[in-house]
Image: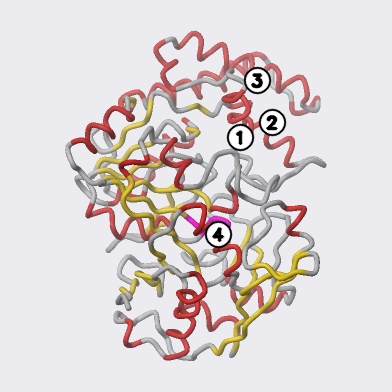
């Protein structure tokens, strides 16, 4: 069972990329199986500036590893070409030898992004990243999608992209409409990006399963977080793919019999991008800004894709219980422990909800029901010591270890890694027991 999985347990932005980057050296393949360019994973390799990844797996910073974009990923060709160029500019290799893209992955077309932007700028806005994800997903399940494999028939690709922009043109305001020549130029630019990715096209399901049969270790990297899952998240304020372990396996074409260890990533602070229910949200704007941090810092609470400031709240163990149960989490990685003192001398932690007059330890799974929940808190002391320079669990102040122990006791899952800063080496290993 040589397949391990890393998934996010909250609303995204938990720090999955940095933990994948940290352990990628122990695997031969690192694979993405869900989401698309709406995901944002930041890694900070040694001797390098922070690297923001959206579609390329976080293992790309480790030489000699094969990175796979699986069939469950919605691939935006233009953004992926640009991302590959940005990764190469750092001196890292990106070639057919270390990056493969599933021929069965669905492509984001220009009109998908256009329709997404129209909705987000109107009364039906959902807080999306305007990456076209919901529209490419809609085409997929209408069985009208465009898969990467259609590059074998570029004429069909051209026609589908052109027809899509014609439909978009019909609903655009007069001053925003494109001329036939402009539409043609847009399609040709998009098709050029698809063709540039051709060297990376492969039957990734076959390759992953061959590697598994040989006993090679595979690491599956989840995108987004549990509460954005289309089936188990706070519907309808979710993404358009499954962010759970089951969804990730499906998006890679791998049987659950290969599953070995599932690591869930959660952060010590709580945040959310966009609107919708947020039970533990901090209403004090000054406190929220202090916890969020300054814009532009690697570990500040701004969306990696949208750059929007995230809403800030108190840690929530109730939501984590749902994520742990559905994903079958074996161990936790806890990020941003160094941010806890930003809450002040004390921090509140939600340990249960009151819903319709009754206490519950797990959360309802719809946005409508969440609106009727109230958090029940436990208050803990924070600490003054700068823990970002520490390397051993025994060096943490007692208030910090009590905070970590609360997660373990309440959630029933061991914490094995603790992030105390954004860097690759700013991770403390927690002894078991």
The image quarter containing residue 144 is top right
Question: Disc 3 marks which residue?
Answer: 165
> In front: 364, or 139?
364
What label does residue 132 carry, if any? Answer: 1
Dots 2 and 1: beta carbons under 8 Å? yes
Residue 10 shown in magenta: yes
Q: Is residue 150 magenta?
A: no
Q: Would you call the spot at circle 1 few (<14 residues within 10 Å), some (14-19), or many (20 or more)?
A: many
Quadrant including the C terminus: bottom left
Tell me the residue that label 4 is attached to: 10
| x then y, percent, for residue 240 | 60, 38
Q: Main secondary structure of the magenta part?
A: loop
- Residue at disc 1, secondary structure: loop
How far from the left and from the top, in percent, is residue 392?
29, 81
Within 10 Å of disc 3 (Cα), the crowding (few <14, some 14-19, many 20+) is: many
Contact between labelled residues 1 and 3, with CB atoms less than 8 Å apart: no
Q: Secondary structure at mark 2?
A: helix
Q: Residue at x 69, y 76 (%)?
A: 376
> Dot 4, crowdedness within 10 Å: few (<14), some or many (≥20)?
many
What segment is highlighted magenta in the picture?
Answer: 8-13
Residue at 53% x, 67% y: name it.
300
Q: Which mark is residue 259?
A: none
Compute the Cα span from label 4 to label 2: 28 Å
Callout 4–callout 2 Cβ contact below 8 Å: no
Give 154 or 385, whichever is nearer the viewer. 385
> Residue 115 shows which numbered tag?
2
First along the sequence among labels 2 and 3: 2
- Mark 4 or mark 3: whose residue is earlier in sequence: 4
The answer for how far apart the CA atoms under marks 2 and 1 are is 7 Å
- Which residue occupies 70% across, 51% down? 366
């Amino acid at each position: 069972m040589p397949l391990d999985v890393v998934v996010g347990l909250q609303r995204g932005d938990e720090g999955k990329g940095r933990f994948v980057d940290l352990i990628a050296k122990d695997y031969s393949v690192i694979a993405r199986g869900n989401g698309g360019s709406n995901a944002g994973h930041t890694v900070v390799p040694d001797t390098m500036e922070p690297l923001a990844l959206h579609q390329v797996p976080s293992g790309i910073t480790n030489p000699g590893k094969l990175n796979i974009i699986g069939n469950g990923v919605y691939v935006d060709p233009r953004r992926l070409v640009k991302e590959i160029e940005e990764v190469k500019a750092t001196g890292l290799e990106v070639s057919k030898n270390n990056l493969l893209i599933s021929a069965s992955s669905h492509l984001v077309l220009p009109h998908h992004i256009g329709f997404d932007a129209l909705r987000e700028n109107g009364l039906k806005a959902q807080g999306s990243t305007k990456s076209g994800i919901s529209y490419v997903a809609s085409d997929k399940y209408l069985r009208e999608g465009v898969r990467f494999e259609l590059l074998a028939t570029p004429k069909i690709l051209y026609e589908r992209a052109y027809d899509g922009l014609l439909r978009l043109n019909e609903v655009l305001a007069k001053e925003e409409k494109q001329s036939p020549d402009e539409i043609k130029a847009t399609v040709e630019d998009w098709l050029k990006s698809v063709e540039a990715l051709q060297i990376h096209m492969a039957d990734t399901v076959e390759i992953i399963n061959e590697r598994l049969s040989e006993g090679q270790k595979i690491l599956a990297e989840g995108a987004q977080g549990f509460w954005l899952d289309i089936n188990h998240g706070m519907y309808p304020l979710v993404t358009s793919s499954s962010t759970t372990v089951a969804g990730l396996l499906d998006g890679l074409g791998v049987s659950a019999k290969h599953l070995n260890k599932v690591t869930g990533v959660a952060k010590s602070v709580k945040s959310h991008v966009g609107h919708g229910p947020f039970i533990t949200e901090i209403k004090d704007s000054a406190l929220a800004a202090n916890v969020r941090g300054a814009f532009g810092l690697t570990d500040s609470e701004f969306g990696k894709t949208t750059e929007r400031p995230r809403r800030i709240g108190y840690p929530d163990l109730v939501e984590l219980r749902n994520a742990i149960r559905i994903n079958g989490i074996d161990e936790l990685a806890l990020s941003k422990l160094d941010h806890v003192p930003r809450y002040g001398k004390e921090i509140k932690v939600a340990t249960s909800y009151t819903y319709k007059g009754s206490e519950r330890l797990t959360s309802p799974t719809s946005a409508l029901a969440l609106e009727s929940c109230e958090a029940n808190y436990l208050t803990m002391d924070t600490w003054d010591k700068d823990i970002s320079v520490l390397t051993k669990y025994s060096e943490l102040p007692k208030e910090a270890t009590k905070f970590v122990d609360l997660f373990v006791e309440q959630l029933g899952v061991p914490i094995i890694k603790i992030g105390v800063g954004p860097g690759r080496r700013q991770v403390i290993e927690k002894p078991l027991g």
